[in-house]
Amino acid sequence: MRTAFGGLTTRGRSFLAAGGAAAVCAYVLGQPDLLRVGLLLAVLPLVCVVVLHRTRHRVAGSRQLSPDRVPAHSESRVCLRIDNVSRLPTGLLMLQDRVPYVLGPRPRFVLDRVEPAGAREVSYRVRSDLRGRFPLGPLQLRLTDPFGMCELTRSFSQYDTLTVVPRTEPLPPGRLIGHNEGFGDGRQRALALAGDDDVVPRGYRHGDDLRRVHWRSTARHGELMVRREEQPQRPRCTVLLDTRRDAYAGSGPDSPFEWAVSGAASTCLHLLERGYAVRLLTDTGALTPGPDSGADAPADGLGGGFGGVASATGGLLLDTLAVVEHSTEESLERAYEALRTSTNGREGLLIAFLGELDEEQTSLVARMRRQAGRAVAFCAQPELVQDTDAVAYEQGGPSEQTATRPDAPGTGPDVPAAGLAGGTVPVLREAGWLALPGGPGVALTTLWQESTTGSTAKGLGQ
């Protein structure tokens, strides 16, 4: 009852105050008729509180997200359903769903009388420019009396989670410079030569399928032998994401860090579609998927979209990148140790999205080149675009300096890279990396095209 009286609206409190004032005036002035009016004014909100408190609405609420994983800057539709599971009709219902402020204002709906066993559906849209995981709910049901004297709020316990993943862009198909594994007809021929099942007999073990018994080997060895199933090995790739706070300047959807996260997500999805076993590595040493996740197992429909394990891996990588934040690490040493001890070794491809690097970190990244068969680095440096635009503006038009922009026409091997990224890009290129400077305003598709067509491949230690 204390909660019910706390739900008195402004109208209900005004009636109580007016009734009390009328009763005092009637006593002072000796007007019994005014006392009756005062009692009516004071009793009406009290009766509404008692009736509303004793009213038991048996309603069920549900929520459906379509979709529940959405890229940043995109909308998701939320559908609410209210079912009246009692034998009595409901009164006026007001719905309010709790929504984080980054998704927009809280949606409110007014539902008229819901008949017994009836249902009502309402929907609204949410949109976020920031990635992350945002809880939706619980759904709040506000009950009110016909006179508007009292309002009570009842909350459901169920809530759902909307995952806002980084924006991705389709990358152009092609073969990375110097890397033949995983692309083109050569890989298809390798799979055809390997086959889906090489006949490598071994001794029978408990639980083996009897249909795999190799009778010729059984007769030769004098014991039961079965054929060993060997699947062709998938090409592997490690995507390194530098999340150090000191490596990036600024914040927000258009910051260099968000550009690197979006680039890592686009790269992961692109390589998964090409049949790679992709892993995400951060400067903290965290590896996703983990070494025991079975992500290296073959997936259905390799090279033709997601299927099986590839689909699950893509969702896991996107969910991880949706919540990745800046780390407090000052060095990439832990990432180097994780890469050195991982099973990828020199068999795989290493693609790194890096922030600003000092001399020590540049040397450390250069040593990472030895741990992979091929290494590509995208350096997120926002000052590249800003500086070149400023030079062009001051001179009143295009100039030689504007050609140093990575996505500008004329960018090629003859353009000096030292002015673009200080000493980072030249050192990485001398170590064997295919290093490309980028950042906000530079399309990843352009950089990816350069890494596959070789427009900046000259003199990169290949």
Image (tube, rainbow, N blue to C red):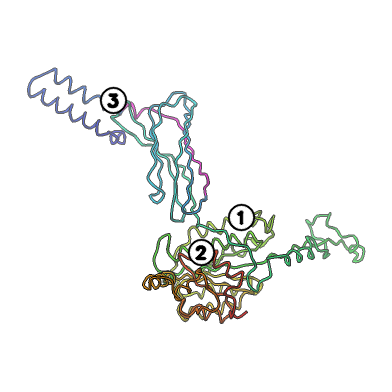
Residue drawn at x 59%, y 68% is: 238
CA gap between label 1 and label 2 equals: 27 Å
Label 2 CA crowd tier, 10 Å (few <14, some 14–19, many 20+): some
Q: Secondary structure at mark 3?
A: helix
Q: Using residue 279 as the reference point, say whether residue 243 is left or right of it.
A: left
Q: Nearer the viewer, residue 179 or 193?
A: 179
Give the magenta part as a residue range.
50-68
Q: Secondary structure at mark 2?
A: loop
Q: Using residue 299 as the reference point, say whether residue 427 is left or right of it.
A: left
Which quadrant does the C terminus fall into? Answer: bottom right
Q: Nearer the viewer, residue 277 or 140?
A: 277
The residue labelled by disc 3 is: 47
Direction right: furthest residue? 219
Do the numbered discs 1 and 2 sit on residues whose CB atoms are within 8 Å? no
Residue 6 inside the magenta-drawn segment: no
Checking the image for residue 401, the label placed there is: none
Q: Nearer the viewer, residue 158 or 96?
A: 96
The residue labelled by disc 2 is: 443
Residue drawn at x 15%, y 21% is: 35
The residue labelled by disc 1 is: 312
Sequence-wise first label, 1 or 3: 3
The amino acid on which the numbered mark 3 sits, given as a three-letter code, is Val
The amino acid on which the numbered mark 1 sits, given as a three-letter code, is Ala
Residue 322 in the image, given as x and y percentages of width and height: 49, 57
